[in-house]
Image (tube, rainbow, N blue to C red):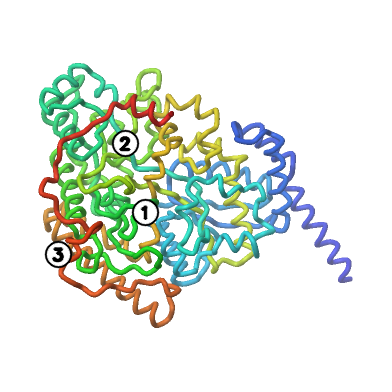
């Protein structure tokens, strides 16, 4: 009788696999959806056959994953889940929420150790958290050990352009990049190329109207279009766009490298060493942050950081369209597509897919044939910036597995994660979302062909300069706990409650207090694996400011001569 039951069970299991997944389904998706690809069709089929076989023990399972809402993840949620189920027999509920809700869910699963989702796409900004708390799966060891039977032999980790962002201080990989986008400079090239405007700008400022190299030039251009040009083709125009709504988005707006763009941090890539883009100090060769305030050797309330926040507030008030101060991250995109803004210093390339929408969809930043009237270029830097520092932020939404997820569900989720970043799928996914993660995709012929319609995106990702854009690094010991402090303090600047100096003093002090609690927890219970903060004693800030490097003393002149570069010459340099 037992033998009969086992035979029936085996047949039923085989039937489920055959009903839901197979070579025919894979071939159909390869032919009809997964083109173009970095692989030949036969190579794609070989990769898909591996997925079919690896997924057999999990066929019929239903798993849940979570990511934020951007076009790339919408494509995964609506299209790639269906393909994955057809090919493997595993059903995936890929839920989309706002970034803050994703971070909250990740934090809740870490705190409670209850399995809320089987996998997350969460920012690599949490690499310092994941590598310390050891609640996320160490993927290097997972792929070589317990997860080896479900690790794609065609994955090719070295092809991922963001793997350094998801590697902890121990050299282990904790997250697998799924999508990446940078914050770059965005401008209306058609306006910048107008001879009459170029002549007027040079007559007033003494240098050429072009892509600003420094913040002085950005400010001059913002003033020029807002106060001198004022109107183009009957439309009131402005020289700057940003957002300032009191919400978590506002905190990320600043932790996303704004201080380091001004020059607050130290030299060193992918993040400043020893002072990072948050202003947190961690000495080279250690894993213990020692402080954020200048009195402890950090730079969060130093002159460069205060300058950065002051300029954000001034530009938003003086040069942005009415209402911009009440926009959040998501509202700033449709506002820009109205076509009344000349430039934006902090523009995310995740918006590229929407910004190349046709004019018939209400996008006033493309011409009648759909070609962009705008371009993207490297971010200008502030007066405290030095050669060798990072120049901007790069978001790397990355697959993260947790130890609290049952192993069978974790394996099924890992298969899905690898599927949506596979070479079979990635070129097509990148054409949809324009968030590159692989060298083989960036350099694919189809993107050479499409590049003129993407406003500089392809040229940037193929350029050697891209290494200067990076996410939050390992100096931040607990991203969820520290990130939530930022937006309230920054919001108090925008609302006029505090000056930039007062707000950053409070922010630095609060970060130190939170890290002090982390230190006690680590010393008492090894909460952060011995890599929690070990704060420096406070000393007179003047002592730190007198030393070389970051934190940096206040400059006598925070507005040097503006400097610009010709966009076409810049692109030629990248191509060499």
Which tag, 3 or 2, sits closer to the chain's start? 2
The image shows residue 559, relative to residue 292, as above or below, that is above
Q: Position of residue 558 (x, y in %)?
A: 14, 46
Disc 3, SS: helix
Disc 1 element = loop
Percent position of residue 450, x then y: 48, 26
Q: On the rendered structure, is 503 left or right of 463? A: left
Mark 2 crowd level (few <14, some 14–19, many ≥20, 10 Å Cα): some
* Nearest to N terminus: mark 1 or mark 2: 1
Residue where numbered disc 3 is placed: 542
In contact (CB < 8 Å): disc 1 and disc 3: no
Q: Nearer the viewer, residue 433 or 563?
A: 563
Label 3 vs label 2, nearer the camera:
3
Q: Where does label 1 land, which residue?
A: 271
According to the picture, the residue beneath numbered tag 2 turns out to be 334
Q: Residue furthest front?
A: 548
Query: Residue at horizontal 35%, vertical 20%?
Result: 367
Return the x and y of residue 499 as percentages of the image width and height: 12, 56
Separation of disc 1 and disc 3 at Cα? 25 Å
């Amino acid at each position: 009788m037992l033998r009969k039951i086992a035979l029936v069970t085996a047949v039923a299991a085989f039937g489920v696999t055959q009903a839901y997944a197979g070579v025919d389904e894979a071939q159909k998706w390869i032919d009809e959806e997964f083109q173009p690809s970095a692989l030949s069709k036969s190579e794609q089929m070989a990769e898909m056959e591996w997925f079919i076989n690896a997924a057999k023990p999990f066929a019929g399972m239903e798993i849940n994953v979570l990511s934020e809402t951007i076009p790339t993840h919408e494509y995964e949620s609506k299209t790639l889940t269906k393909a994955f189920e057809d090919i493997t027999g595993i059903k995936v509920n890929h839920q989309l929420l706002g970034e803050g809700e994703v971070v909250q869910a990740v934090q809740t699963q870490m705190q409670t150790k209850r399995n809320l989702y089987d996998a997350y796409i969460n920012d690599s900004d949490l690499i310092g958290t994941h590598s310390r708390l050891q609640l996320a799966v160490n993927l290097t060891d997972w792929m070589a050990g317990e997860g080896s039977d479900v690790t794609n032999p065609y994955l090719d980790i070295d092809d991922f352009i963001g793997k350094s962002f998801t590697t902890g201080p121990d050299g282990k990989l904790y997250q697998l990049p799924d999508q990446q986008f940078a914050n770059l400079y965005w401008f209306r090239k058609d306006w910048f190329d107008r001879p009459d405007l170029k002549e007027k700008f040079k007559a007033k400022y003494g240098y050429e109207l072009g892509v600003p190299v420094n913040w002085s030039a950005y400010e001059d251009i913002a003033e020029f279009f807002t106060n001198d040009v004022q109107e183009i083709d009957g439309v009131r125009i402005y020289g700057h766009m940003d957002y300032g709504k009191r919400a978590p988005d506002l905190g990320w707006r600043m932790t996303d490298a704004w201080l380091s763009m001004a020059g607050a941090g130290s030299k060193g890539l992918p993040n400043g060493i020893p002072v990072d883009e948050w202003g947190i100090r961690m000495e080279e060769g250690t894993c213990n942050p020692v402080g954020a305030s200048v009195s402890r050797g950090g730079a969060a309330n130093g002159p460069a950081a205060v300058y950065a926040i002051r300029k954000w507030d001034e530009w938003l008030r003086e040069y942005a369209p009415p209402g911009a101060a009440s926009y959040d991250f998501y509202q700033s995109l449709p506002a820009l597509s109205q076509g009344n803004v000349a430039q934006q210093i902090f523009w995310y390339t995740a918006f590229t897919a929407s910004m190349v929408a046709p004019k018939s969809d209400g996008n006033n930043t493309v011409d009648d044939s759909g070609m962009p009237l705008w371009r993207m270029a490297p971010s200008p830097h502030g007066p405290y910036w030095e050669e060798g520092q990072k120049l901007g932020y790069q978001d790397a939404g990355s697959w993260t597995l947790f130890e609290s997820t049952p192993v069978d569900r974790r394996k099924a989720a890992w298969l899905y994660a690898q599927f949506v970043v596979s070479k079979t799928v990635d070129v097509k996914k990148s054409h949809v979302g324009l968030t590159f993660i692989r060298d083989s995709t960036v350099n694919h012929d189809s993107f050479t062909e499409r590049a003129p319609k993407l406003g500089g995106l392809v040229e940037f990702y193929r350029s050697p300069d891209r290494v200067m854009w990076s996410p939050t690094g390992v100096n931040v010991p607990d991203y969820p706990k520290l990130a939530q402090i930022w937006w309230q303090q920054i919001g108090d600047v925008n609302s006029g409650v505090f000056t930039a100096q007062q707000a950053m003093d409070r922010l630095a002090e609060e970060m130190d207090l939170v890290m002090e609690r982390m230190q006690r927890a680590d010393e008492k219970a090894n909460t952060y694996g011995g890599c929690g903060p070990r704060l420096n004693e406070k000393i007179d800030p003047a002592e730190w400011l007198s030393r070389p490097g970051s934190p940096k003393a206040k400059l006598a002149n925070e507005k040097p001569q503006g400097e610009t570069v010709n966009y076409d010459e810049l692109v030629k340099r990248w191509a060499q």
